Amino acid sequence: MGFRSIRFYQFRNLENTLWNCSGREIFLVGENGQGKTNVLEGVYCLSYGNSFRAKKDENLVRLGASDCVVEGDFLREGELSLQVRFLLTEGQKRLSVDGKEIRDRSELVGKIPSILFIPEDTQFIVGPPERQRHFFNQTSVLGDPLFLPLWNRYGKLLKQRNAALKQGQIEILSAYDPEFVRLGIEITQSRKRIVEAFTRVFSEIFGQVSQLADPVSIEYLPSWKTDEPKEVLHLLAQTRERELLLGASTSGPHRDRFRFFFGEGEFSTTASNGQIRLASLVLKTAQALFYAERTGRRPVLLLDDVLLEMDHSRRKRFISFLPAYDQAFFTFLPDEPFGTYLQPTTQVYTVKKGVLQPHEKGG
């Protein structure tokens, strides 16, 4: 199972090609800036319908071109083939599965689930609260197909509520609040379940990979301290004057916080950079395990330059703890010992100036 081929057309700096990528492990080897991450970005676009780094879709189009395409032929369990297409043309994005156009990106999520590992993942451990909320939202989407519509409804209502606060429309606020509370409590309860499951897996894997005795844990700090709708509505009534003054909703899941502990203190104050990096890798591994347990399916793993700062023994231990996957894409610099991780099912490609070529030993 996994991608049998991917076609790139005017996508970033990648050559126009139909790329055979049927190996269970795909190693992309090349210097920085040659296009390795662009390949992973293309796979990610087929999974989620957007980029993990481009702020604007048009940045995905090759310089001087007007459109781009990424198409994937993905083999699922039971020998079922899935054709996914990501097209940008004249500033418009079009997604399709098996020739049928998808209007809502949520229809694509879950077709080809992928878990991305990038250096910036440390922000989930020590970064601002919005990055941590993003991580747990992403995890919820992977494990529960109903979460994304729930979060989208909450987000839409939050915007409407904030607009009413700015305009001082108190009667409209009274109409919005019951649904705002109901949706918010659903999100809070979902996050509580996820954090509980994550703490166990996160702690176990971190200890075994790091070989450190210090315990690790995750603490969830919901903005609303109760799951009782009447009590939350009472809180909103108490804070109404302040919210009207600020023109914004000051409580709810969009203000939740998470804390990651290492030993007696938080990671941000007690852990080294290497320990924080390892924790971020373990966090994503736990995310993949969570997805597999919830759905019974195996994800595609995308690992971009995340093994660089680990010594050889920790690399080997980390790779051994990766969850079962349909396919895994790794990027390596040429001087990294990628040969020690080769499996009989591995394909190795060199990437230079956007061109993918089968790797030749000693080349």
Image (tube, rainbow, N blue to C red):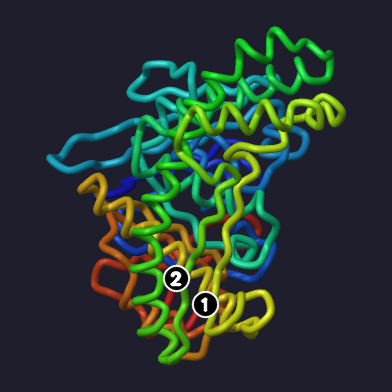
The residue at 41%/68% (across/down) is 348
C-beta proximity under 8 Å, tags 2 and 1: yes
- State the SS at label 2: helix
Q: Position of residue 276 (x, y in %)?
A: 59, 76
Local crowd size for mark 2, using a 10 Å CA cut-off: few (<14), some (14–19), many (≥20): many
Which amino acid is tagged 2?
Answer: Val
Foreground pick, 92 / 265: 265
| The furthest residue to the top | 171
At 68% from the left edge and 15% from the top edge, which residue is drawn?
173
Quarter residue 9 falls in:
top right
Does 328 appear above or below 134? below
Q: CA distance from mark 2 to mark 1?
A: 6 Å
Is 20 located above or below residue 303 in the figure?
above
Residue 217 position in % (x across, y down): 46, 71
Foreground pick, 269 / 64:
269
Residue projecting furthest to the left: 78
Q: Amino acid at mark 1?
A: Leu
Note whether 362 is above or below 184 in the view shown: below
Where residue 116 appears, as percent x and y from the top left, is 49, 56
Q: Nearer the viewer, residue 313 or 93?
A: 313
Instruction: Kindly identify which residue carries mark 1.
Output: 278
List x then y, in percent, for residue 126: 65, 67
Task: Report whether 181 appears left or right of 33.
Answer: left
Who's the residue at 58% across and 69% down the image? Answer: 30
Q: Which residue is mark 2?
A: 282
* SS at badge 1: helix
